[in-house]
Image (spheres, rainbow, N blue to C red):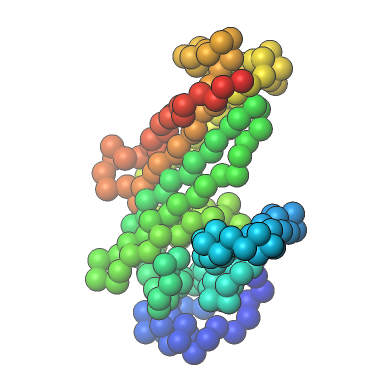
């Protein structure tokens, strides 16, 4: 979490106009690790060395998505207030202010497990408010496991929904580990019975957890968990 530094006059005025109250949390963009950063720089140097200008331009354009290589990206923030949030859209542009008492959020958490090892989890929160706009918030901002539940609790509390109306979380025990190219017996947990086998090996699985809060009706009280199996890799 980023320290509570004073916001820009633009953000301060936006929060005041929407009556968001006091600032509580600030989240900065997630920075790349040293190894990944060095790999991107190395790729650029190799492309320059071999005079591959098109490849260099394309790689540099892709690198601009990361805050480590873009001043505009590194200046973006997700700010949580008492009565709402202010966030910079990932596509750029002016910051967006949304209030908890009118906000509807669609949450999607995607987890890929290959060879008993979880890949980085993807978080996508599509937040919208009638008359105030909409924005998509992802793991681009650090600590999604912190700001995600705080957003959920703030929305449910502000709209006075009963505790049972919130989306349920998929139990950790149901995320069964599935091998991709090792023998299933090497896993700490056995694969589910419906996991198809290819040459004696099981396919990797993508777990997608989708939920909406606050729910529109009692039929949406539980999160919907779906499983998608990508194309099996050749051993």
Pick the front one: 76 or 224: 76
Label total for image = 0
- Relative to 172, residue 199 above or below: above
- Relative to 163, residue 57 above or below: below
Residue 196 rendering spot, x and y as whole percentages: 48, 14
Could you say which quadrant of the image residue 146 lies in? bottom right
Furthest toward the top, the residue is: 200
Residue 216 rendering spot, x and y as whole percentages: 27, 48
- Relative to 88, residue 33 above or below: above
Pick the front one: 214 or 55: 55
**At 66% from the left edge and 32% from the top edge, which residue is drawn?**
117
Could you say which quadrant of the image residue 39 lies in? bottom right
Pick the front one: 14 or 54: 54
**At 64% from the left edge and 15% from the top edge, which residue is drawn?**
184
Q: Quadrant of the N terminus?
A: bottom right
**At 33% from the left edge and 57% from the top edge, which residue is drawn?**
104
Furthest toward the front, the residue is: 51
Furthest toward the bottom, the residue is: 9
Residue 176 rendering spot, x and y as whole percentages: 57, 24
Q: Quadrant of the C terminus?
A: top right
Q: Is residue 105 visible?
A: yes
Residue 70 rendering spot, x and y as whole percentages: 57, 72
**At 62% from the left edge and 36% from the top edge, which residue is drawn?**
118
Q: Is residue 25 visible?
A: no
Could you say which quadrant of the image residue 75 lies in? bottom right
């Amino acid at each position: 979490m980023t320290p509570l530094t004073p916001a820009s006059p633009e953000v301060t005025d936006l929060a005041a106009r929407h009556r968001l109250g006091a600032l509580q949390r600030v989240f900065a963009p997630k920075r790349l690790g040293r190894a990944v950063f060095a790999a991107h720089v190395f790729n650029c140097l190799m492309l320059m060395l071999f005079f591959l200008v098109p490849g260099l331009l394309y790689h540099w354009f892709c690198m601009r998505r990361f805050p480590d290589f873009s001043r505009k990206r590194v200046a973006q923030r997700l700010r949580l207030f008492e009565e709402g949030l202010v966030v910079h859209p990932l596509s750029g542009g002016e910051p967006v202010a949304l209030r908890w008492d009118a906000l509807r959020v669609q949450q999607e958490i995607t987890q890929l497990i290959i060879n008993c090892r979880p890949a980085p989890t993807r978080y996508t929160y599509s937040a919208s408010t009638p008359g105030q706009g909409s924005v998509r918030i992802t793991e681009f901002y650090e600590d999604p496991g912190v700001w995600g539940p705080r957003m959920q609790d703030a929305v449910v509390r502000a709209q006075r929904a009963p505790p049972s109306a919130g989306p349920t979380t998929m139990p950790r025990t149901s995320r069964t580990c599935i091998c991709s190219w090792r023998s299933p017996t090497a896993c700490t947990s056995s694969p589910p019975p419906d996991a198809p086998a290819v040459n004696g090996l099981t396919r990797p699985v993508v777990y997608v957890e989708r939920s909406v809060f606050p729910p529109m009706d009692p039929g949406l009280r539980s999160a919907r968990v779906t499983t998608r199996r990508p194309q099996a890799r050749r051993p």
